[in-house]
Structures are given as C-alpha cells and as structure tokens.
Image: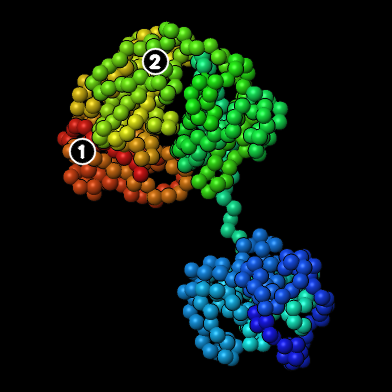
Amino acid sequence: MTNPKYSILMKGLAVLATVHMPPAVYGEHDQGFLAAMGGSIEPNSADMYSFFEGQCTSYTAWRLNQAGVPFHNHWRSGEIATCPVPPSGGRPQGASWNAGRWSHAWQWYYKARHLGLRIDNKPAVNAVYCSLTDSGYGHVGVVDSVGPDGSATIAEYNWRNDQQFSKRTGVRVDGTTEFFIHFTLPPAPPTPAPPWGLSHVVTHASAMLDWATSAAAARYRIQVSTRREGWNPGTGWDASDNRMPSATLPVNSTVQGAANSSYTWVQGSSGSLEGPRPSGTYFWTVRVVLPSGSASQYTAPMAFTMTAAPLPPRDDHANGLPGSTPLQLDSPQPGRLDTLDVDVFRIQMPTLRAVVLSTSGSTDTIGELLDASGRVLATNDDFNGNRNFRIESALPAGIYHLRIRGYQNSSGNYIVSALPVQDVPVVLGDDHGNAAISATLLTLGIPSVGRIETVGDADFFRIVVNAPRQINVVSLGTTDTVGDLLNSTGTLVASDDDSNGNRNFRIARVVEAGTYFLRVRGHGAGVGPYTVRFN
C-alpha cells in the first residue's frame, strides 16, 4: 500500500471479504527491513526508494534491491511515463494514475507489462505478488519461497495490520486480478579473457612490453613492480605498498581481433610508470578492460631486468616516443639498428594524406605505425618478399610515430622514408595479395591504399569481426572499382560496383563474428590507385 493513513478497519473488511484466505503468520517487523529504515518505521516519511516507509511498496522495493534489482519509485521512469492509462474498469474505483512513477501497488502491473516484464501465475523466489483489487491501492509483496505443491509463501507489509510484517502460505493466483511479476536483471557484461603471448624487449633504459588479446575495443591497465610476491590476479599489486615503484597506469589502446598491443616503459621520462629507476629486476602484469567496465584478470607477472646506464653514444635514434627523431615527407633518413635496439621516428601530418612508410637496405626490419599515444595502428615485416617493411595508410592530420626494430633482434643499417602516395615509385610486383592466403589486414577506421596494376588484377584484404554487427566497406578515388565481400570459406556474401558514387563501391552488411575477405578489382578495363576503408 502507498496510503500512509490506510486504516486497520478497512484492511479487516478486505480480509473478511476473502472467502479462501490462505493461512498467514503475523509478526511485528522484518528485522532486516527495520534496520534499513533506521530502526523504526515513520509512516509519513519517504524511504530511500521514494515510497512511504512501512507500506507494501516500500518493503517490496527493499526486497528487490536485496535480490540485486536496483528498483525504486522512479526506476526506468522515462519508459513507464509512456505507459497508457488503463481504463476505469481496469483499476480501483477513483484511483489516480501517476505517470513516470511506480506509485500505488495496482499500477505496478500495468507498468511492468508496458516494460515487457514477464507476468504470469507461476511463482518464483523474489518475484513480486501483485493484486489489483486489494483496497483502493492494490497490494504487492515478495515470493519468499515456493512449496512442493507450487503454492507461494508471500512476505509482505500492510496485508492485515498497518506497517506490520506478515507471511502468507499456500498462495495461488488466478492471473486475472492477481499476478506474479518477474523483475529480472540485465545480463552481466561478458568477462574478457586475460591477455596472452606476453613478451618484452629491453633496450638499455627502456622496456617494450608486448601482449595479444582477442577482446575488441579494449583498453589495458598495466602494473610494474619490484617484487613478485603480493600479486593478486584480480587486483594486481597494491598500489599503496611502498615497495611498488608507482601507481597503475591505464594505457588507452584499442585492438580488433587478436591484434597485438604494446607499451614502452622508458627510464627517465615523465608519466605514471616512467621515471628514473634503479637497476634491477622488475615484474609487469596487464589486464583487459572492456568499454562496459568488465575486466579480465591480471596476467601472471613477467620479469625483466633494467639498467640505469645512459644510452650508448652509438644509438642514433631514440628508443621511445620521447625524443623521437622527426621524419619529414620526402626526406629519407639513415639509421642503424644495434642488437636489441629500437628506433622511433616522429611524423607530423598537417592534413589528411595517403603515405607510404618503408625501409630500404639489407637489414631485416619490422615497422610499426603508432598514433600519438603509442597505440599500434599498423605493422608490416617483409613486403613483396624482401626483408624491408612497407606500410601504406591514409593518415588524418596529427602526430604519428614509426617504430623500427630488427627481425629476431637483427642489426644493421637501413634507410627509412615517408613518401606521399603520388611520389611513390613503381614497386615491382603486386601491392596486395591476389588471394585470401596473402590478404592484407584491413584495420577498423584506418584507410588502406592500393592500386589495380593491370586488367584482371585483384587485391585481397582480411577483415576480422569480433561480434555480430553491421560493417561498411567503401572505396574512394577515381578508379572504377568493384568490391566483393567473401566469408572465410571464400563464398560470396555481397558485391557492389558504384553505390558510393563516382564509380566507387559501398558494401553495408550485417554479419556474424568471424574472418571475412574483401576482394577489390577494376570494373572492365579499370586500373589505377584507390583507397578502401572499413567502418
């Protein structure tokens, strides 16, 4: 009940009018509820759920919250505000309607039905018993238990005596004026698997920490400690412990599929994890955090050894983002990789432009394109069969970094360049594979540049989709292109020619999770450059 002045006499008349009254057990209070109300019931005072204390609605709201449902008088108010007002025959005589609030007990039935909650005559523990006809306000209680015969025991306030607790046993409802409302919690967000494939490369006074994950749109939380003991898979190390050199650092990084991600810890730079450290052994651990807030456990600690010695003079380029060497467009730079060395270059794009980042020389190099925060955008090892990398991408205005390291710690000289697409020399061979087995990874939101070299040429791109969703793949440019979307077995899923205007294709399709391939080919005798984007 929600009327604080509801009389014992009226309740008694309602009881006498019920011919088949289930047996009831009456007591003064549910002690847990009484404690939640501050030790006493104030009938004219609102409780923490915005119902009057001691009313049936107040007690039922408390029980729902005890069961994990965050219910209150304004729960999902925006949705129940649109609930149609029931006709006069479907509510107690003279009863008012309160839009946007759950209000009197009889209104719970209509608003729960409007939300699509399950309503039936089948009791379940913590389901809400709802009566439309009890007094002028209806009545609600909670199913405390279900007997072997299928009848319910109802825990409630205000069934017989104002602001007093009771339990009724053997309760059954007919589904016409009495119901059971099943309030259910939304499904818990999925818990991602911990990162895997942990590795690290220590270069003088920095450590490049690498890992892989299958979680999409994730960020990571890294911890570094001087000790192995005290680590907990759920919480990592205690940041307040003075043996831990620093607090945890959230590293914002997004990956798709099983893409690798990494973070470079540099001695002597600023930041939560950076700063001068004494030589010695350190331990690091990382966890995945989804946008929903659901997080994996921390990985088992990995150990690495740092030295406080300054970088040797022979290191020509910085090993981390701080102090990275500027790399201008059309201005190649020489470099040298020593054992366990990493060189980082800084690229500033004043406007959106397609560029090719590559090395030349006999040294086996690996290239990684990073955004301003160090997030890996693209990576390449051996382009076209030689041992130099080549990364092609359309980069919006902003700061980027190019990290170069030797394959399996190989050392030697190289020349690195950043060339605008129109300045790129002709490369012998094909820029992208002609079959799924040699497809180029197409990263979400990162354009990729290609060229149809000859009539009949086809470029394959690999697309990884982590959950059922709509994908959009488009081509841009003046070349007349045709796009074919294939599934992992090579079966055609969708195809398009000119839907994106100006002879470019556009494929929009709802797909299941999995690996797909985009085949780009020229229409008729169409050849020339193009750009593809996956959104």
Q: In this view, does 283 lie to the left or right of 471?
A: right
Q: Please tell me whether mark 2 sits on a helix, a strand or a loop.
A: loop
Asked if marks 1 and 2 touch (Cβ < 8 Å), the reply is: no
Give me the disc on residue 317.
Answer: 2
Image position, residue 495 (x, y; %): 29, 45
In this rendering, the answer to whether 400 lies above or below 207 is: below
Three-letter code for the amino acid on which mark 1 is drawn: Gly
Between residues 242 and 112, which one lies in front from this camera angle? 242
Residue 207 appears in view: no
Nearest to N terminus: mark 1 or mark 2: 2
Residue pointed to by mark 1: 477
Q: Please tell me whether mark 1 sits on a helix, a strand or a loop.
A: loop
Look at 52% across and 16% down and name the residue there. 205
Look at 75% across and 91% down and name the residue there. 9
Between residues 58 and 215, which one lies in front from this camera angle? 58
Q: Calculate the distance from the C-alpha at mark 1 to the C-alpha at mark 2.
A: 36 Å
Three-letter code for the amino acid on which mark 2 is drawn: His
Which quarter of the figure has residue 226? Answer: top right
Image position, residue 12 (x, y; %): 76, 89
- Is the residue marked by circle 1 packed among few (<14), some (14-19), or many (20+) residues within 10 Å? some
